[in-house]
Image (spheres, helix red, strand yellow):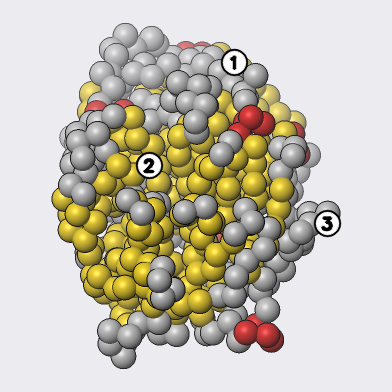
């Protein structure tokens, strides 16, 4: 391949002026701060020639003073050598000139969600050209974009593989040129995982002969680095099964619905309700939740509960577990239940002032007088429980949740044997490839092997971490291959040997908290393969609230006598977690995958 050599070896961009065009060339030898504004960690690796820029899925390079690049009316040509490390079904931008947040859309070339090279050009809407050559991880590919007066072309390895007509000139904007992702007004995303080398811009459309002449095969192959394997994540979904869109997902039949607590502030004064928990205890079904006359996570929050003696059809008046009597600045909220050795335990998230110094408090129900005995703080370090304690084969109990504080990671607590007032906090680390979290989490237990599934704050996808020593140590939380709303999930094991996950996990739901779904595995298997709809937001047959904007969230589930009882919040049309508490009762037999 042709290589330019110059005395000024430290310069990352070289400009050639010819009578017919101007050419810019980035050798990718060094990250020159005068040429680039870099985000994240830009590594160096072997290039198609010399060195290359290696990007880790979090980093990108923004070319300084590039707002007017590729603005010639007659067209232009970009070329870049690309070595992808990861094909993960996400958009990975190679070169772009876009800032979507400012409505600055021009063009970009990427590895798209279907793992194909694809060119996007803005024509009042995105029009595309795709390549037939599939990107091969570890191998070098020469990708070229040519914009001519009436059409744009995508070339791979010296061959024209895609063409798209242009009905108008490509718009010009103040968006900068970026390599390896998009700087969307401060949001860094669509990041590439791999190496880039020998980037070139020519302010004219090159001829087919010139483009074919630019390609020479590069035989060198990169070993895929560990950071790329980490970005690839852990599968939760069976890739051989089709994840349905919302409209195509099967709706469960024979589900019974009931209202645990109606949202009625005009009657009881409580405007906020969230975090339903359920437990069967001595033949009665208990439900708890956080309740607040004011706004969420404020001092007037109370941990409350009610009881049903007819399987969830009717419920007792609401009573309080704890109103925060230990101190004036203490609030107690929602948590989890555990019925153990004839005693009903409650473990509730609590905080001081406005969600400060978060911790977990334990209580036991004195059934003779109908009040709760407090056992004080049992877990600190910001721990807020999200799933009832699960008894492990080593004799300890494991309670899953999150740590509210720096980074808000997923976390668990381990008991000291059968002592449910003595717990050890364990934070689950997160991968550098994972951005902002709000790590409400749930676990699936298989002997000493435990899988933690956590909410991701930055993207509608489930995060996964694993432990092979009963929860004492964990792999880092990484992205899975299962889309999941940015809300609390709940998982467990059915009596059929199927794993289940209640949340919103359809192919197109994104960050929408509806429909309420349950994903299941085949008996004895680990990967989810089927998604059922429990109910949609619009549900006129009731009971329960029905509205197109209803958020069905924060599920909790418990199996009892062949039925799965699922509690959840329903916001109706209101939002802001001003919820009703509702219940769905699902025959376990209807969750078969075949």
Left or right: 406 in relation to 131 = left
The C terminus, quarter of image: top right
* Residue in the picture at 46% in, 77% down: 320
Q: Earlier in the sequence, mark 1 or mark 3?
A: 1
Q: Residues within 10 Å of mark 2 (few under 14, many from 20)?
A: many
Mark 1 and mark 3: span between their CA atoms?
47 Å
Viewer-side residue, 393 vs 93? 393
Q: Percent position (x, y) of residue 484?
A: 53, 44
- Where is mark 2, residue-wise? 443
Q: Percent position (x, y) of residue 3?
A: 30, 22
For residue 590, above or below residue 272: above
Cβ atoms at labels 3 and 2 below 8 Å apart:
no
Left or right: 150 in relation to 426 = right
* Residue in the picture at 26% in, 46% down: 397
Residue 390 visible? The answer is yes
Viewer-side residue, 145 vs 287? 287
When asked about the image quadrant of residue 363, the answer is bottom left
- Where is mark 1, residue-wise? 132
Q: Tell me the SS state at disc 2.
A: strand
Q: Residues within 10 Å of mark 1 (few under 14, many from 20)?
A: few
Labelled disc at residue 540: 3
* Residue in the picture at 53% in, 56% down: 284
When asked about the image quadrant of residue 53, the answer is top left
Residue found at the very far right of the displayed protein: 541
Labelled disc at residue 154: none
Residue 154 visible? The answer is no
Q: Percent position (x, y) of residue 44?
A: 22, 33
Q: Tell me the SS state at disc 1.
A: loop
* Residue in the picture at 45% in, 34% down: 493
Q: Residues within 10 Å of mark 3 (few under 14, many from 20)?
A: few
Q: Percent position (x, y) of residue 247?
A: 75, 39
Q: Earlier in the sequence, mark 3 or mark 2?
A: 2
């Amino acid at each position: 391949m042709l290589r330019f050599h110059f005395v000024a070896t430290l310069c990352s961009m070289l400009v050639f002026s010819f009578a017919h065009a101007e050419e810019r060339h980035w050798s990718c030898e060094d990250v020159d701060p005068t040429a680039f504004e870099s985000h994240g960690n830009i590594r160096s690796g072997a290039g198609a020639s010399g060195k290359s820029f290696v990007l880790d899925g979090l980093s990108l390079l923004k070319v300084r003073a590039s707002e007017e690049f590729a603005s010639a009316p007659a067209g232009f040509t970009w070329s870049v050598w690309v070595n992808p490390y990861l094909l993960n079904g996400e958009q990975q931008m190679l070169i772009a000139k876009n800032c979507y947040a400012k409505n600055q859309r021009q063009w970009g070339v990427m590895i798209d969600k279907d793992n194909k090279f694809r060119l996007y050009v803005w024509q009042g809407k995105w029009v595309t050209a795709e390549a037939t050559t599939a990107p091969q991880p570890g191998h070098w590919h020469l990708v070229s974009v040519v914009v001519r007066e009436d059409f744009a072309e995508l070339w791979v390895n010296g061959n024209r593989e895609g063409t798209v007509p242009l009905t108008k000139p490509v718009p010009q904007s103040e968006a900068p040129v970026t390599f390896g992702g998009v700087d969307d007004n401060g949001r860094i995303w669509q990041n590439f995982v791999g190496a880039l080398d020998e980037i070139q811009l020519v302010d004219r459309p090159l001829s087919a002969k010139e483009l074919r002449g630019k390609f020479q095969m590069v035989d060198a192959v990169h070993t895929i680095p560990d950071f790329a394997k980490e970005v690839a994540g852990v599968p939760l979904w069976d890739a051989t099964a089709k994840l349905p869109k919302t409209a195509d997902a099967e709706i469960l039949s024979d589900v019974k619905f009931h209202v645990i607590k109606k949202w009625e502030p005009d009657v009881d004064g409580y405007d906020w309700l969230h975090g339903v928990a359920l437990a069967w205890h001595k033949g009665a079904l208990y439900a708890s939740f956080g309740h607040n006359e004011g706004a969420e996570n404020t001092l007037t929050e109370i941990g409350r509960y009610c009881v049903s003696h007819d399987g969830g059809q009717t419920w007792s008046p609401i009573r309080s577990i704890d109103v925060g009597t230990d101190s004036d600045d203490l609030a107690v909220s929602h948590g989890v239940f555990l019925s153990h050795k004839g005693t009903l335990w409650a473990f509730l998230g609590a905080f001081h002032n406005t969600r400060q110094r978060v911790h977990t408090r334990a209580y036991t129900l004195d059934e003779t007088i109908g009040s709760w005995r407090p056992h004080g703080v049992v877990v600190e370090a910001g721990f807020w429980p999200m799933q009832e304690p699960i008894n492990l084969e080593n004799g300890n109990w494991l309670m899953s949740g999150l740590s509210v504080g720096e980074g808000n990671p997923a976390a668990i607590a381990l008991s000291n044997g059968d002592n449910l007032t003595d717990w050890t906090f364990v934070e689950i680390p997160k991968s550098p490839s994972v951005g902002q979290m709000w790590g409400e989490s749930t676990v699936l237990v298989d002997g000493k092997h435990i899988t933690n599934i956590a909410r991701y704050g930055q993207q509608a996808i489930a995060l996964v971490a694993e432990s092979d020593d009963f929860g004492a140590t964990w792999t880092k939380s990484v992205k899975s291959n299962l889309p999941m709303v940015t809300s609390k999930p709940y998982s467990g094991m059915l009596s059929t040997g199927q794993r289940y996950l209640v949340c919103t996990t359809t192919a197109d739901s994104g960050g929408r908290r509806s429909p309420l779904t349950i994903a299941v595995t085949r008996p004895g298997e680990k990967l989810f393969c089927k998604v059922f709809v429990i109910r949609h937001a619009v549900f006129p047959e009731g009971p329960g609230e029905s509205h197109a904007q209803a958020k069905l969230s924060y599920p909790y589930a418990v199996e009892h006598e062949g039925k799965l009882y699922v509690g959840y919040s329903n916001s109706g049309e209101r939002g802001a977690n001003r919820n009703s508490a509702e219940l769905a009762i699902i025959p376990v037999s209807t969750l078969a995958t075949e």
